[in-house]
Structure formats: C-alpha cells, structure tokens
Amino acid sequence: MSFSPVRFIRPVLFALCVITILVATGNQLFAQGTTRDALFGNLLGAESRLAERGIIADIDLTQFYQGVSSGGADYTPKYGGKLDYNFIFMGEKLGLWKGFVTLMHAETRFGESVTNEGGALAFPNVNMIYPSPVKQESAITGLLLMQYFSESFAVAAGKINVLDFWSMVYPDSGRGIDGFMNLNSIVIGMPWLRFVNPSVSGAGALVMKGKQIRGGLLVFDTNNSTNTAGIDNLFDKGACIMGMWRFFTNYGGKPGSHLFVGGWSSRTYTSLDRSDWTFLPGIGGGLTPGEKEGAWALAYNFEQLLWVDARNPERKIRLFTGASLSDGNPSFARWGTLVSLEAFGLFRGREKDRMGVSYFYNGVSEDFKQLVSPVVQLEDVQGVELYYNAAITNWFHLTGDMQVVDNENASNDTAIILGLRGKVDF
C-alpha cells in the first residue's frame, strides 16, 4: 500500500486548532498557567503540604494517535493513552527512619496502540506496553523500597519497573512519553528480551551519583510481574543476575560516560535450534520442542554531550550509542546497536522543546530464523525515528513522531509509522 497521509489530516488539524486556541488566549492563560510546571500547580497548597509530610506526587496523562501509513500489518490509526501516577515516600518525614525511600509507579492504560502493527519486534510505542500491551488495565508496575546508607550507596527490593530503572540510569531517555517512542530508539533491548520482562521482582545493591544509578548488582525473577504482585511464583522458574558499572568522563569540559552491563538467567527456555526439536509419530506424538538452559547478554553504552549552553545547562545536544550481544539461543536477537542524537532547548525562546533522530539495527537470531522458516521468513530489524517535542506550555507538550521501520517479517514492506503524542502534567 502506498503512503497515505490523508488518515492523519484530522488529528493534525485538531492539534493545530489546540495550539491556535492556546496561543490566542495568551493574555490570561500564558500569563498565569504557562509559567507553572503542572496544570493545577500547587493547588490550595496541597503539593507543599504533602512534600512537608514526605510525599511527592507526579501525575501525568499522555495520549497517543499513531498509525501505519504504509508497510506493516495494519493500516488503521490507533488512539490510546496512559495515566502515570508516580509517588515518592520519604521515610524520615513519614516518621520512619533516615535514608528509607519508597518509589511507587501505578499506570492506567486505555484505548488502542500500534504495538504490533509495525511488526512484533518493532515496538513503536514502548510506553503502551505497560501494564498490558493488548488491553485496558490499571496496575502498580513499580514498587521499589530503597534504603540509603550514604549519598552514594543504597540497597533496594521490590517490583522493578524496567523502563523506570533505565530512566534512573539515563534520565534524559524520556520513558517513551518525552523523547523517542520506539523501544529500540531508547535502549538496545532485543538481545535482552528473553529474560528481562517489563516489570520484575528482585533486589540488589546500587551505587548512586546524585539521582542517577552509577552501578550495581541485581538479582531478579524471570517471571513478568507487570500486572501481578509477583510473589506467588517468585523464582519458581529460575533467577537472573545482572551487574552494571558506569564510568563518567569529561571530554573537552563536556560530560559523558561508558556503561558496561552483563546479565545471566538460570531459567530453562524453549530452544530456538530446530535440531533440538523432535517429531514423534503415532497417537499422542507430534512435534516436541527442545529445551535450552540459561541465557545471557552483554551491553555497552556510550553517552556524550556535544554542546552545552554555558548559561543554561539544560540546553544541550546529547549523543547516545552502544551495542549489545546475546547467546542467540534462546534469545531472539543475537546482537543489536543504536545511535541517537537529541537536542534540548536548541532554539532560544524554546528552551523546553526537545527533538531527536535515531537509527537502530537488531540482528535476529539465525536459529530463530531457521526455526520459523517453514511458516514465515524472518530478517533483521532496523529503523529510523524522528521526533519534535514542542512545549505549548510548561505543563502541556505536543510531539510529532515519524518512524521508518523494516520489521522482522521479510514479506512486509518497510513500515512508515506516523504519530502524535500529547502529554499533560497535572
């Protein structure tokens, strides 16, 4: 099917109307509402009173309108959204003990998403994977209890929202609601997908640098606990161990870092090597899958600021790149790589805007390709994503996003995925 922008005229016109109305009401709205970071601000002093008692709340609504204009598996644009409720509970202010902090993230997903339309391994909207990629649902996807023994060392336990954890390593990653929308543009995740789920139960020790995670050692469950408590079947199928360390650098007066990550799972998985599968004829026979014990993955990531405004460090240009390698069996992808360039507040007078371009490539496991070859021909996954996030007000951001994805299905044409994202901070 050829490229058809007609399907996107209505949402684009709607977005333009919203912008026009907001600009036209500038005398009052922009004089009062746009200077605060949240729509309701410190309403009746509620935010300040909660903070004094040790509770910090951050609630936002993100709406998506995305569709595949050509290529892919479905051409019907999808509308959906997320309500994210983030809470920080400070133990000492709540009458507990010093250094104790609880991070809670609850999410409500509604509507539809193009999660699978661009290809099963394309992941064009990572945020809509939580708490369920296919249905409307509300769940606590992260509940992490942390005990700080110093400013740079803490132990943690609970339910780990992996996307949140990644944003604690790289705060500029955007979690799919501020920056890039495609999972592959945010993290080289495909080589890790076999044993790292969206939310996992686990514990570990963390080395911190301010609010960022510098390194640590984690042990977590192999079961997905995104919309469950994750306690009933804890470690019943094995455990994962992940270690990471980040070296911070300063090249030419501009900060950067090198991150090394390694992970291993003890779980027994279905083998992707078709020579491990057997066919037993007769009654009760059939094709029996083989098993593969254990899985591993390694990753390296490089981050470097290329430009920083001396008067406003929030204005910057960020380079992010890296590569990841896995076993290839049972992991679905043998390797992957990513390079992205993002600019924050590039234009004067538009300090709250951000924009970016990324390129990603994931080498699908040869064993996986051969295993499913009688049914479907698989190929490597690659793509490009571009976005511009415009701050209409401090609390309302409108993002235009375009993805060009060559997905894993060799019979599909290259998919062009267009989208609009609107985020309101309450």
Image (cartoon, grey):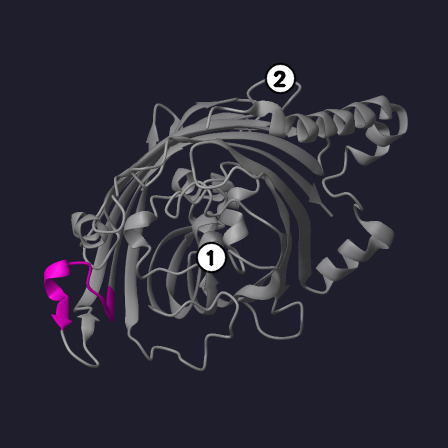
Q: Quadrant of residue 108?
A: bottom right
Query: Mark 1 or mark 2: which comes first in sequence?
Result: 1
Q: Residue extending furthest right?
A: 28
Name the residue: 76% across, 55% down.
47
Give whichever of 218, 389 is nearer the camera: 389
Q: Which labelled disc corresponds to residue 411?
A: none
Give whichever of 358, 145 is nearer the camera: 358
Q: Residue extending furthest top?
A: 348
The amino acid beneath tag 2 is Arg
User: Which residue is labeled 1 in the image?
Assistant: 151
Name the residue: 56% across, 69% down.
98
Q: What SS does tag 2 mark?
A: loop
The amino acid beneath tag 1 is Glu
Q: Quadrant of residue 347?
A: top right
Name the residue: 82% across, 28% down.
30
Q: Is residue 7 above or below residue 333?
A: above
- Disc 1 from disc 2: Cα separation: 35 Å
Query: Count of labels shown?
Result: 2
User: Which residue is labeled 2 in the image?
Assistant: 348
Give whichever of 82, 52 is nearer the camera: 82
In the rendered image, is residue 169 in sight? yes
Find residue 1 and report its horizontal and vertical position in percent: 46, 28
Start-end of magenta stretch = 265-280
Direction from residue 32 to residue 93 in the image, left or right: left
Q: What SS does tag 1 mark?
A: loop
Q: Is residue 51 above or below residue 64?
A: below
Residue 155 within the magenta-colored segment of the rendering: no
Name the residue: 20% across, 68% down.
289
